[in-house]
Amino acid sequence: MLISTAKEKILKILESAAKKRIRIVISNPCYEVFYICHFKKDPPVFSTPKEAKEFLRELIPDYSESVDYWDRLSEGREDAIQRTDRPVKDVPLTLGLASCSNVGRLFTEMESLEETIRGNDAIR
């Protein structure tokens, strides 16, 4: 099968991953959209990762890609998870169409897995 566009390639990867029960996380145009969702319910549309990072620096003036923000963003984390807990099929794959993320789904899946493991440990 000839795959002619980047979007078609991504869709093929998502289809293959789903068949193998692999979970995919996408942030469009970049991971920083998840950080922005700690502060904003609906992030603006960014055409490039650079635009998103510049916007994030308005919210976190000393933002750097090489710094761990886990503790620093703890206050807005539940909101960000809720805002980004969506199926990967609901994340637009075209730059400039919408800024979106499904990183929250990763946290939800991890919590579910943790509950399953705890339940299995209780059975033993």
Image: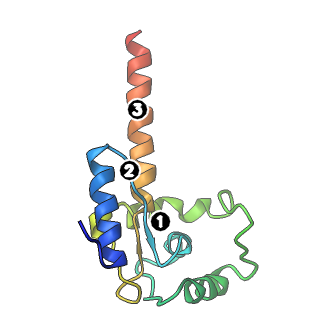
**Residue 95: % across, % down:** 41, 85
Mark 3 or 2, nearer chain start:
2
Snapshot quadrant of residue 12: bottom left
Q: Name the residue that disc number 2 marks.
A: 23
Mark 1 crowd level (few <14, some 14–19, many ≥20, 10 Å Cα): many
Q: Name the residue that disc number 3 marks.
A: 115
Q: Is residue 49 left or right of residue 121?
A: right
Label 3's element? helix
Q: Name the residue that disc number 1 marks.
A: 80
Kindly indicate whether the residue at mark 1 contacts the one at mark 3 (C-beta within 8 angstroms). Answer: no
- Which residue is found at the position 45% from the left and 34% from the top? 114
Please tell me whether mark 3 or mark 2 is closer to you in this view.
2
Question: Would residue 92 be visible to someone looking at this image?
Answer: no
Mark 2 crowd level (few <14, some 14–19, many ≥20, 10 Å Cα): few
**Residue 109: % across, % down:** 39, 46
Give the amino acid at mark 2. Answer: Arg
Snapshot quadrant of residue 11: bottom left
Q: Is residue 94 left or right of residue 19?
A: right
Label 2's element? loop
Please tell me whether mark 2 or mark 1 is closer to you in this view.
2
Give the amino acid at mark 3. Answer: Glu
Q: Considering depth in this image, is 16 or 80 the residue closer to the camera? A: 16
